Image (tube, coloured by chain):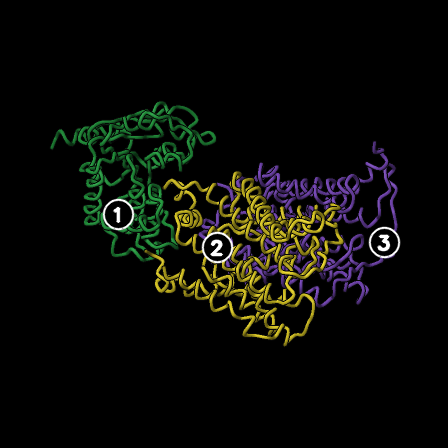
Chain colours: A purple, B yellow, C green
Amino acid sequence: MIELDILLPAILNGIMTGAVYALVALGLTLIYGVLHIINFAHGSLLMLALYGVYFLYTLLGIDPYLAFPLVVPAMFALGYGLQRYVIGRTSHGKEENILLVTLGLSLIIENLALYLWSADTRTISTPYGFATVDLGVAVIAVPRLVAFLGALLVTALLWLVIHRTDLGKAIRALAKERQGAQLVGINVEHVFAMSFGIGVASLGAAACLLLPSYYANPGIGRSFVLIAFTIVVLGGMGSFLGALLGGLIIGVTESLGGLFLGESLGQLGIFLIFIAILLFRPTGLFGAPSMGRP
Amino acid sequence: MRSALAIALVLAALLPLPWLVHSDFWINLAIMALYYGFLGQAWNLLGGYGGQFSFGHAAFFGTGAYTSAVLQVSLGVDPWLCLALAGAAGGLTGALIGALSFRYGLRGSYFALVTLAFAEVFRILANSVAFTGAGVGLLIPLKESAANFQFPSKAGFYLVILALNGLGLLSAWWIENSRFGARLLAVRENEEAAQALGVDAFRTKLAAITLSGALTALGGTFYAQYFLYIDPAIAYGPGVSVEALLVPIIGGLGTLFGPLLGSAALQLVNQLAGIVMGDAPGLNLVLYGAILVLMIMFMPNGLFGLARLSSRRLIGRTA
Amino acid sequence: MMLALEGVSRSFGGLLAVAEVGFTLAQGSITALVGPNGAGKTTLFNLITGFLVPDGGRILFEGRDITGMPPERIAALGLVRTFQIVQPFARLSVRENIAVGAHLRLASRRAALAFAAEIAERVGIAHQLDQPAGTLTVAARKRLELARALATGPRLLLLDEVMAGLNPRELDEIAAVIRGIRAGGVTLLLIEHVMRAVMSLSERVLVLNDGALIAEGPPAEIAADPRVITAYLGAGAAERMLKERARA
């Protein structure tokens, strides 16, 4: 029998990780909800952001948590540009094309990173890197706690942007009714690009929060992509709350999976959940009926 | 039928290559072109003709490779028999994944995602299970002889992959000239309209993915015999899945010779890139990604697809 | 009885789209199904042909219960429909499009393609046989839709607004084709808004409004039926029209 004092920390750690996963998935769910694009490049963009934060620290000495004002706008600009000038231009209205283009982008980004920075795993050691906090039931690493709180904060911010600003209103309008939105004068291309930009910007935020307790290497994009998709599908495409809860569930699943099944099989649970959701309940916990199903 | 003639001519033209060209380098290049072309042909059956884009064809490739390798190494099964068994395993895997996905109506992006997930599940399992050699992989012991499916000279491998290509071309030809193929294309174009005309879309797609899986598995076996080593990353990793779809997209989805053309073009690009940029890791994949994006942007019908309508008239699709 | 519906109902969420509809179609008849927009006509077609499953009631085709059967099985039994919004196999040629229908009964590729050419001739699109279906005009697409369904060798054909968007000459041509189909022994049920066609082609008219069958009978009767006029033009219109007719 697994004792509580092994189980509880595992669950808590899962929640901590889950919150950051949720932040990553949030960007994806926004992009899907508004643009109906399944963004295969999401993971590799996160990887790029992680390297960005890494180099800012190792070359310029900027602490990850302080790198927000640099990384987030940069990622936003990248996302905006990608949607406006690459993805938006290639779709020709076909879903398969967008799929392939984002796949192509992920290939480019991943392998460029491989070429430029080699396959070596990069970690940073910050002064607070090994600090811990005793929560009574478990001892949590400070960076992970900060990541958790930061993720919740950014999620709340994102929610505010989407639900309390004019831009957010435009985004929601566009997501619901493309033609109608056009008719009332919303610049579709621009708002699409803004949405994509925001989605990618949240990756920048996630990277700043992640790196102190995680690592960067060219291949992690791939594992993040599937995890992010699992969360988005679990929570329901386009649902913020769903992505948050989904993230926590997946984080805990991964943690417990690793505990019971060991390192290599640990992620199996996630993909099996993914397949099961896609097959049996593709609308997820909170989502609206989605495409790809009759 | 004119396209049948074209297939015969192409195969006949390619047949004598190992005796005309004596450089190992060029023969290897030809083998690689035919190998990727074959993977592309297999993917094309489901993706190009069937319109179902799989992002996880590695699931079939790896199953074929491992089935054949494990049976040979652990049980001493005759390698040629292993080829057939691998094909069956691949077909079975295709049927399983297809039955699940299509039964629950997955299409488009969702189908692509679920195939990706399946491939990853297989990879994780292969990485953790002992009989596949886990992360260390499997080595097929060197024992050169034609009976052992390990040829001392490249010519033997060349002929095998050429024969497989013939199989691929024949499958595509069959799709272009049969009732099954007509139904598959109808389902691709408009599933509901096809159903309204009596086409069982589920069974049609299932048959396509089974065939595609079986052929892809044969490709996996060929890889294992040619390189004598596989591991979970090679067998079930995204590399194979990407290569399988890239080739028909470049050459032309849903065309007879598209995958072959695409593969040849890709090999050419590879060689040129190697000359210009040197042997840097990952750089050729950057190129693949860039080509993919550019193809979709400017030539979504691929190289062959551009000429498709006129070529159909040339080759005489209709009876 | 070619087709018999008994108490067929279907809701979407809170909306009752089809409410306890029941009627029969005699073998070899041509019947029109009319009603204002949103009456539930296409929904009814979807229910009959298996694209939707009824919440209640039964559908019998040639005596056999087909309620809830999948569309491809129903089509294979001889009950075939066309779509209101035409659905060509865009990248296939006209010939290949029709051949898909022909393949329901013919296994040979050659035979199916040959038969397709024959059908195309009957329907009037033979000169476009090798064109990709996606490049056809709307009128031609409608004929293609008809040709494809015809190629399956149906015994009951459900045509959904096959006349919409056609000019008078095209209308006459299609009407002739439809009469020819009927002469070949096929039973027809048409959803139509083009009243001219309804009046001249059909022997019997079924009127649907708000999901319910409100009237049925020969065309002339239906045209004068106050319930029908009310359904289309609103309350009071029936009275006004009848008064005007009385005066005229």
Residue at the disc numbered 3: A129
Chain of the residue under label 3: A
**Where's the C terminus of chain C, which quadrant?**
top left
Give the CA distance from mark 3 to mark 2: 51 Å
Labels 2 & 1 near each other (Cβ < 8 A): no
Drawn side of residue B222 relative to residue C24, left or right: right
Q: Specify the label residue B48 is tagged with.
A: 2
Dot 2 and dot 1 within a common chain: no
Chain of the residue under label 2: B
Residue B307, image x, y percentages: 41, 65
Residue B199, image x, y percentages: 40, 42
Which amino acid type is marked by label 2?
Gly
**Looking at the image, is B234 positioned above or below residue A267?**
below
In front: label 3 or label 1: 1
Nearer the observer, C215 or C77: C77
Dot 3 and dot 1 within a common chain: no
Please rate how many residues cluster around mark 1, counting C-alpha atoms within 10 Å: few if below 14, some from 14 to 19, many from 20: many
Please rate how many residues cluster around mark 3, counting C-alpha atoms within 10 Å: few if below 14, some from 14 to 19, many from 20: some
Nearer the observer, B44 or C237: B44
Chain of the residue under label 1: C
Element on which disc 3 rests: loop
Dot 3 and dot 2 within a common chain: no
User: Which residue sits at x=39%, y=23%?
Assistant: C57
Which amino acid type is marked by label 1?
Ile
Drawn side of residue A24 relative to residue B50, left or right: right
